[in-house]
Image (cartoon, rainbow, N blue to C red):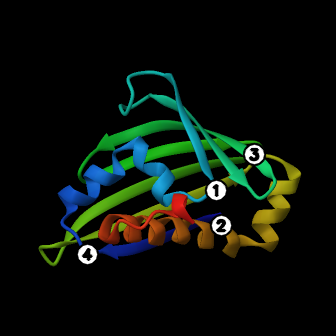
């Protein structure tokens, strides 16, 4: 299942990237985020792996992020693996109108078990909605200092 989402952020790209490229900020725009733990490679560089832990409802979800391309401020790509799903994500950041940033996210979810194949078939909109929620929360954090950690 492949889809794209995008958002316009009312700040210059350099300011947006400073917030995006800081693991400490993840708690402010990724709902349910609990922790990030470096696993291998040079942190933040291609090939680096990080364990990301989230609380989703009553369950905990662990995702392994692997950075596959880092060409900031233009792009940042990674793979995200958890039980039942492999996600390839490409993030592009474009200067927009001189003082805004367009963030384009290209997502490719590949179910790796039967249950996730069913979920991506009957509820494909849920995945896109979650991606868009993260982007809106990031926009609110960057522009207004709003944090989902306070919610």
95 above or below 149? below
Q: Position of residue 23 (x, y in %)?
A: 42, 42
48 above or below 107? above
Q: Secondary structure at mark 2?
A: helix
**Which residue corresponds to mark 3?**
60
135 above or below 39? below
What is the number of the mark on residue 48? none
| Residues under numbered marks 2 and 1 in contact, where contact means CB atoms less than 8 Å apart | yes
Q: Secondary structure at mark 1?
A: strand
Q: Residue at x 42, y 72 (%)?
A: 6
Q: Secondary structure at mark 3?
A: strand
Q: Residue at x 42, y 64 (%)?
A: 138
Q: Residue at x 64, y 56 (%)?
A: 109
| Residues under numbered marks 1 and 3 in contact, where contact means CB atoms less than 8 Å apart | no
What is the number of the mark on residue 109? 1
**Which residue corresponds to mark 4?**
10
């Amino acid at each position: 299942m492949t889809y794209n989402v995008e958002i316009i952020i009312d700040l210059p790209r350099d300011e947006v990237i400073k917030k995006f490229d800081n693991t400490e900020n993840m708690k402010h725009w990724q709902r349910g985020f609990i922790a990030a733990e470096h696993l291998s490679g040079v942190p933040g560089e291609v090939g680096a792996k990080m364990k990301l832990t989230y609380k989703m409802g009553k369950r905990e979800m662990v995702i392994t992020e692997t950075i596959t391309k880092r060409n900031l401020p233009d792009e940042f790509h990674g793979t995200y693996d958890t039980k039942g799903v492999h996600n390839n994500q490409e993030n592009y950041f474009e200067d927009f109108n001189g003082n805004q940033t367009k963030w384009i996210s290209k997502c490719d979810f590949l179910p790796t078990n039967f249950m996730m194949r069913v979920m991506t078939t009957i509820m494909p909109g849920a995945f896109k909605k979650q991606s868009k929620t993260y982007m809106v929360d990031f926009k609110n954090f960057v522009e207004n200092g709003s944090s989902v950690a306070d919610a």
